[in-house]
Image (tube, rainbow, N blue to C red):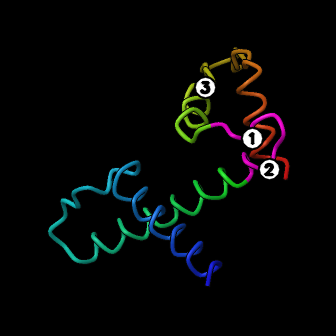
């Protein structure tokens, strides 16, 4: 019974995340097909977010880091691309950004 309750809690939190952090408060579409497509994309993004947080929680360097902080570090990573003969520039990453990327990519 405790395991079932725990699973229910995760599901409720995931739907709360869908509504709040993934901007699902208002579905402003007038076509059923577009609504289904948006719900599908929201579900896929929730799966990715859950996977990222699972990997973050299993990594020693990032364990206990709040989701908002993780995504702020990811958001700040960028690359500058040039046309022509110039090479792309990737600014150096902070230690936290490297830790987050290592946690996400290495499980």
Dominant SS type (magenta): loop
Span shown in magenta: 55-65
Q: How far is mark 2 from mark 3, CA to CA? A: 25 Å
Q: Nearer the viewer, mark 2 or mark 3?
A: 2
Secondary element at tag 2 = helix
Up the image or down, 26 lies above or below 68; here it is below
Residue 76 as seen in the image, left or right of residue 65: left
Q: According to the image, label 2 marks what residue?
A: 58
The residue sitting at 74% across, 15% down in the picture is: 92
Q: Position of residue 38 (x, y in %)?
A: 35, 65
Identify the mark at residue 4; answer none if there is no mark: none
- Contact check, label 2 and label 3, Cβ < 8 Å: no
Residue 67 screen position, x and y as percent: 57, 42
Task: For marks 2 and 1, give the CA distance.
Answer: 6 Å
User: Where 26 falls versus 65 (above or below)?
Assistant: below
Residue where numbered disc 1 is placed:
63
| In magenta segment, residue 43 | no
Residue receiving disc 3: 78
Mark 3 packing: few (<14 Cα in 10 Å), some, or many (20+)?
few
Between marks 3 and 1, how big is the CA–CA gap? 24 Å
64 in the magenta segment: yes
The spot of residue 24 in percent (x, y) is 31, 57
Quarter where residue 10 is shown: bottom right
Could you tell me which residue is drawn at 65 percent across and 50 percent down?
53
- The mark that comes first in sequence, 3 or 1, is 1
Crowd band around label 2 with a 10 angstrom C-alpha radius: few (<14), some (14–19), many (20+): some
Q: Earlier in the sequence, mark 2 or mark 1?
A: 2
Q: Secondary structure at mark 1?
A: loop
SS for tag 3?
loop
Among the 4 quarters of the image, the one containing residue 54: bottom right
Q: Tags 2 and 1 in contact by the CB under 8 Å rule?
A: yes
């Amino acid at each position: 019974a405790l395991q079932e309750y725990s699973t229910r809690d995760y599901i409720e939190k995931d739907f709360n995340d869908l509504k709040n952090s993934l901007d699902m408060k208002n579905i402003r579409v007038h076509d059923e097909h577009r609504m289904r497509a948006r719900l599908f994309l929201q579900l896929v993004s929730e799966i990715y977010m859950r996977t990222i947080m699972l990997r973050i929680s299993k990594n020693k360097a990032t364990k206990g880091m709040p989701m908002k902080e993780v995504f702020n570090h990811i958001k700040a990573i960028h690359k500058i691309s040039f046309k022509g003969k110039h090479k792309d520039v990737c600014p150096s990453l902070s230690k936290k950004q490297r830790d987050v990327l290592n946690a996400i990519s290495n499980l």
